[in-house]
Amino acid sequence: MSKPVFVLLHGAWHTPKCWDRLIAELDGLGYRSVAPALPSSNADPLPPDWLADVETIRETVSALVNEHDTVIVTHSFSGMTGGTALKGLDKQTCASQGLKGGVIRLIYIAAFLVPEGFQHSPQGTRDNMMSEMKTDFKTGVVTVLPEDVKDIFYQDLDEATIKELEKDLRPHSLGSYWGTTTYAAWRHIPTTYIIGNKDRLTTVATIHHLISAAKSSGTHKIDNVVEVDAGHSVFVSMPQWTAKTLIAEAVRQA
C-alpha cells in the first residue's frame, strides 16, 4: 500500500511556514506533505469571508485523491473550513467514482471540531472572540498583539523561537469568523483529535466540550483522542513526536 499524503491546514494569522519543522520530519520519514496558503490570512486584500479557504482546501485535496490516499491535518481555525470542505472526498465515495485515493483520516490539532450549521460569531459582531483578538471593523481584519502571542499560540516555546515565529504572523479576515459550516467531515471520515495539555486552560476545556458534544450529537467517526504535554502548536514545539503520531494515526485501522 502506498504511503498517504498529508495535507496540513494552518490556523488563523499563520502561513504555511508554521509547518516547516513538521514537514522536515515527515520528509525524513519518507512521507510527502502539502501545506496550502489559506487566503483568510494570506491574501491581499483579505477576503470578506472564508469561502476562498474552503475552495483552496477542496481544490488541493481533489487534485491529490485522483492518485493518493490523503490525511487532512487541521489546526485551530482551519478545523471549521477543513471540516466543511471535504464533502464527497472520503475514501469510500472516491472509490465509487473510480479514483485511486481518498481522504482516509482527519487529524485535528487544537482545532474547531464543530457540527453542520456552526457559526463562530454572528454576522457583523465580534461575539465569542477572545479579548486578545483585536478587531477592526473598518478594515475587516483581526490581529493579535506581540505580547499575546506566547499565551495564545506558543505556550511551551522559548522566547527566541517565539520572536522568529512572530515575524510570520499576519492579519486575519474578520469576516471569516462569520461563516457557517455546511458539512461535518468527522461524521464520515475516521478522525483523531490531538490535545496539548499545556494549551490555555480555557482552550483545553473548550476542546473537551467540543469532542463530547460531537460524540453525543449522533453519527461520528471520532475514534481516538491523543493527549500530550505540549501547547497549542505541538507541531512546532515537538515536530518529531507530531510526525510519528500523524503517521501512526494514518495507518491505524479505525
Image (spheres, rainbow, N blue to C red):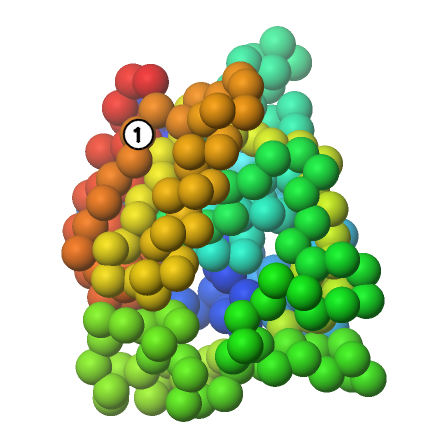
Res. 25 visible in picture = no
Q: Position of residue 171 (x, y in %)?
A: 61, 79
Amino acid on which disc 1 is placed: Asn
Q: Quadrant of residue 97?
A: top right
Name the quadrant of the C terminus.
top left
Residue at 54 percent across and 25 percent down: it is 217
Which type of secondary structure does the marked residue at label 1 adopt?
strand
Is 194 on the left-hand or right-hand side of 215?
left
Q: Quadrant of residue 151?
A: bottom left
> Residue 126 location, x and y as percent?
69, 69
Q: Is residue 236 above or below residue 162?
A: above
Q: In this view of the protein, which residue sits in the foreground, 185 or 219?
A: 219
Badge 1 local density, few (<14 within 10 Å), some, or many (20+)?
some
Q: Which quadrant is home to the N terminus?
A: top left
Left/right of residue 176 with respect to residue 210 in the rendered view: right
Indicate whether 138 appears above or below 53: below
Q: Nearer the viewer, residue 164 or 48?
A: 48
View extreme (top): residue:
96
Residue 194, by quadrant, is: top left
Q: Residue at x 51, y 48 (%)?
A: 112
Q: Is residue 111 among what the camera can see?
A: yes
Q: Which residue is mark 1?
A: 224
Q: What residue is rendered at 73% in x and 46% in y?
A: 180
Residue 2 rendering spot, x and y as whole percentages = 34, 26
Tell me which residue sits at (34%, 24%) in the image: 223
Task: Pinpoint residue 14: horizontal percent, then vertical percent.
Answer: 50, 70
Q: Is residue 30 left or right of residue 34?
A: left
